[in-house]
Amino acid sequence: MLNRRRFLGVSTLAASAGITAGTQAQVARPAASTPTRLGEGAPRRIIHVVADGMSHGTLCCADQFSRIERGKPLTWTRLLNEPGTHSAFMDMRSLDSMVTDSAAASSSWGCGRRVRNGTLNVSSKGKPLQPLMQLFGQAGWKRGLVTTTEITHATPAGFTVSVDSRSQGSDIAVLYLARRLDVFLGGGQNHFDPAKRKDKRNLYSEFLCDGYYVAKTREDLAHAPLDQPWLGTFSGGHLPYTLDRRADANLLKTVPSLAEMVDRALAKLGRHDRFLLQVEGGRVDHGAHNNDAAAALREQVALDEAIDRIVAFQEMHPGTLVVLTTDHGTGNPGLNGMGSDYKDSPKLFRHLSDHKASFSTILGKLKKASSITESGRVLAEYTGYKADEKKLLRFLPFLSGKGSPLFDGLKSETSGLGQLLANHTGVSFTSGQHTSDYVSLLAFGPGSDRFRGLIRNTDVFETYTDLAGIDFRNPEEPLLAEAASIQGLSTREENVGEYAVA
């Protein structure tokens, strides 16, 4: 039997299916918006913040790092003790694995159903599921995406489109034109630029013709008119790591920080009665994939600076629900007990402040070094670590793919560098991959009391739609057997190697 909710879910899905299987056909725009009736005490604005790849150890180390660098704890951890803040753990598993990727994770929030790793809001049978941004748009809410990754990357796309592979960045860019969100801010120029797209399609021109203001620099964003929708892409791929941006005067001038993007997005969306905004600190994950503690922790602190803006906005607009969470752990870093009675740990941890560049930059320099002595000089210049020759000799084979750790999850060149530098910083990683953590979630504002205890990732979609008065559920399916987990994943899986390229 179909009850009213199930009937609405099935019928709406059939009427407005999205794109799958890598096609570039246009998607019909939603019908004219029909405002929904909000329940008593329901939020009028929802801000969903994702520290992508933030393990529990990442949050802890970032808080300790913030106290050293900034003389204060993270706002994230400070909020844990604030009245009215609710916290939970969340099971983030995907349809086909205990360990999720970012696409399946964001989709679990975005459509309220667990999907296969590598896919975005698509069932195991290839049927598209309706994502939040489409549903909220139909209900009359303004919508925005802000990220430090490519704007078409897995996490922002997981709220917005239905495709069978997260790798379809160019197709996702086309779908964004049809979705017509009010704010797109991040990286990813290569997916919009006709010179970079395989089909030579000029999406920038198409967005302009559709009434969008297009921003490509920090100055462009500062002057973006509030009465137009925005497409802002500030680098060819992902935005540069904070560590690299701060060391380059040109990047500082041309690429906005996450906090600046959030400031502008809130200035625009805050003019309206209702909006849904997703904010992603995406390069926390990339730094952790690289076992680059300094880069990952600085990305977490940069996200915290954006959270300060969000907290200030929520204080001015108390009808705003704010949810801070992550989609999965990556690498599970931790500060180890070092030296006699662990007395060396604080001193070594402070060495993270000496890092002048991300591993992406450092590895490029190391690969050009012509001798062990020169490699040592590069390492000392960019990290302050004066490694002895024996350790360098054990590390250098990693640069040519011949490193030999006992655990294969640490065999990459970035993991090799991370292992070497752990002697200097005290921080090491379990791998360069995602982990199955029950992730942290913190919420405040109207509706935040619904986030308590141990919850499922799909509960986020149900909570958001219920609070917004949207009566819709996507079709559900059982978990796939672990043994038959991922057939053909090679076309959908995350390209971790790209995060090690400057």
Image: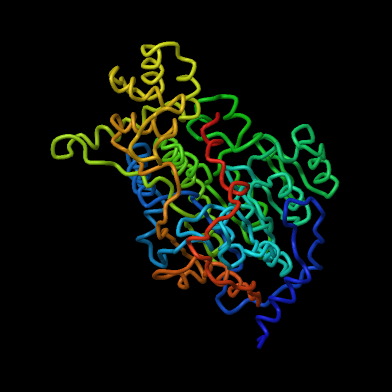
From the top left corner, tell me how far across and down residue 288 is, in percent.
44, 41
Q: Which quarter of the figure has residue 69? A: top left
Q: Nearer the viewer, residue 223 or 103?
A: 103
User: Is 55 placed left or right of 257 in the picture?
Assistant: left
Quarter that holds the C terminus? top right
Above or below residue 175? Residue 36 is below
Above or below residue 192? Residue 145 is below
Above or below residue 122? Residue 168 is above
Quarter that holds the N terminus? bottom right
From the top left corner, tell me how far across and down residue 318 is, in percent.
53, 65
Q: Name the residue located 41 percent from the left edge and 37 percent from the top edge.
A: 291
Q: Name the residue located 28 percent from the left edge and 36 percent from the top edge.
A: 426
Q: Which quarter of the figure has residue 353? A: top left
Q: Nearer the viewer, residue 63 or 27?
A: 27
From the top left corner, tell me how far across and down residue 450 is, in percent.
47, 73
Above or below residue 267? Residue 274 is below
From the top left corner, tell me how far across and down residue 33 is, in percent.
77, 68
